[in-house]
Structure formats: structure tokens, C-alpha cells
Amino acid sequence: MSDWEPPVVRPRRLRQSPAMRRLVRETYLQPSQLLLPMFVAEGLSEPRPIASMPGVVQHTRESAKAVYAEAAELGLGGVMLFGVPEHKDAEGSGALDPQGILNVAIADARAEVGDDLLVMSDLCLDEFTDHGHCGVLDAKGRVDNDATVEIYARMGVAQAEAGAHVVGPSGMMDGQVGAIRAALDEAGHDETVIMAYAAKYASAFYGPFREAVDSSLTGDRKTYQQDPANAREALRETLLDVAEGADIVMVKPALSYLDLIADVRAAVDLPVAAYNVSGEMAMVEAAAQNGWIDRERTIDEVLLSMRRAGSDIILTYWATEVARRLR
Ligand code: PBG
């Protein structure tokens, strides 16, 4: 230590007290930027807990209503609705039916909150198909891109007609955003916003979600969702969605994909959303239940990392809890 000089520059000076740290904090969580994903199931008499997602349930239409109201009251950005139908078929026809569970849930939500909260809907067929894929299959059993996109376009119109402010195409079919935009505009729904799942990966982190929606999938989605090894492809997918008319672009999952949130943030001027998916949530909950981590601090750190990486909007199953705590 003999020739050591005390440092002139001392970053610790700005960390010395809560007040000082508050002054220089760069990133915040705000209820208005949090979206709550919700599952509304057909034919349930009471809400059904999802074992792998502590605190999350499949709602009945009735039980969901209180959550829409609470989300509005807390000033959340919105709710993202997923439907869990009782009956499925090869074409996923429940997705187009105005009486299908997702479409009636959208209408319920709008009746409850009007324009005080944004009502968003998942635009994908996987909850409605008996084979569990995000699209319809061709004669060889492959997911048929263009036939699926045609159904998505009609599904988008059905959701807008039910009252969705925002539709979220999540099926990763080529050309889906452009087709949905054209169909919405043609039907007079030019105000309906498209939040595109732009870079969506074939991820093991969706595990608990499959239980949440009673998924019937066997096999995987690797022919349409992206390879977790690829980063450049995320920009390619995102720029295509922007060119096709997406209003908001999303990266999903979020936690293992923070690099891509930053890349997308740097590449586009649109709002960027990140989906803190079921498996990311389940890992934190499981570790917290074991007493291995401090649950609330971890949740805040996880969500802050997504904001810090550059996402404006976060879809998280913790949205109401965090919003309540922020108040
Ligand atoms: C597809 C969809 C999935 C999720 C959201 N939309 C599942 C999938 O692509 O297999 C996953 C969400 C989560 O894991 O929290 N409609």
C-alpha cells in the first residue's frame, strides 16, 4: 500500500443515504406501465388456483370482474386477457365465436371499466385448438402460416368488436401484423392498437402457462417461435412488425432476454414491452417459498431490470401487487 493514493473520485458519495440514492435513481416502476395477464375460464363455478403460479388463478367471468375494477382503481396500464375454453377443435373456432370465452371476457371487462383501463387480448389460437398449436395444421400436420393468418385477421376483428382497446398477436406467423391491421381498418377499427409479440422465443419459461391455459400441446413450437440462441433475428422480426404497422413491440420472455430488450429499444422509436413470463415468476415464488430469497426485493429487482434494459411496458403477474405496494 505504500504508494497507494486515496481516490479523488468516490462514487460511494452518491449512495450514502436513502435521500441521496433517491435523488440519483435512474429507473422507476409505475403502475401505469404494468399490464396484468389474466386467465378467464369457461364452465368454472369458482376460481381455480394454478399450482405452478402461486397467487394466480383461472378466473370465472364473475371473479374476473373484481380484478378488472381493482386494476383500474390501482391505475394499472391494462389487463391482458387469455381465454380458457371448455371445448376445443382443430380450427380453434371458439376464438372467432362472439360467445367464445375470450370475446365475452373482453366485453365483460369493457362493461366494468369502460375507458379507465386498457383492455387487451391475446390474439392466438393455441388456447382454442385441440392440438394446442398456435395455428391450424395442413395435411402434413405442419402449422399452416397463411391459413392461420387469415383466421387471426378475423379473430382481431372479433376482439375489437367485443371491445378490446389493444390486440396482442402472439402466434409468430409471418405477416400476421399486416393482415390484422388491414382487417381491423377495413372493419372500421382503425383505433384498435396492435401490440405485437415481435420477438418471441420458443422458451422453457412458458411451462407454468401451459397449465394455466390447460394447454393440449404435445411437441413444441420451434417452427414458429424463435431459437433462444439467436439475437439478430429478434431485430429482423421486430422491424418486420414495425413495417407491417405494429404500434407497440414486445420481447418475450424478458429476464433471459434483457440484451434483446436493449437491442430493440435502440432500434425502434415505438414503445417497447417486455413479458415477464410464467416460468420467470414461478422461479422467484419457489425460491421465496423456500426462504432462499427475499420475495419483494427480488420482484422489484426483476422488474426494474426490464425497465433498465429499455422496456417502457411490462406484462407481469405481479402487476396488482406491485401497484398496491407503490401507492
Ligand atoms: C401463446 C402464449 C404463450 C404465452 C403467452 N401467450 C405460450 C406459448 O407461446 O407457448 C406464455 C406466457 C407465460 O408463460 O407467462 N398464446
Image (spheres, rainbow, N blue to C red):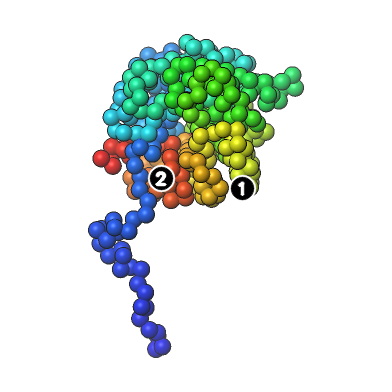
Report how many numbered discs are placed on residues in the image: 2
Give percent across and percent down for residue 107.
41, 16
The residue under the point 45% across, 22% down is: 164
Find numbered disc 2 in the image and state the secondary structure of the residue it sits on. Answer: helix
Residue positioned most to the right: 140
Residue for badge 2: 303
Q: Amino acid at mark 2?
A: Leu
Residue for badge 1: 231
Of residues 260 and 186, the one drawn nearer to the viewer in this rendering:
186
The residue under the point 54% across, 17% down is: 187
Mark 1 CB within 8 Å of ligand 1 = no
The residue under the point 57% across, 37% down is: 242
In the depicted structure, whether residue 67 falls above or below residue 203? above
The residue under the point 47% across, 10% down is: 99
Residue 270 visible? The answer is yes
**Earlier residue among tags 1 and 2:** 1
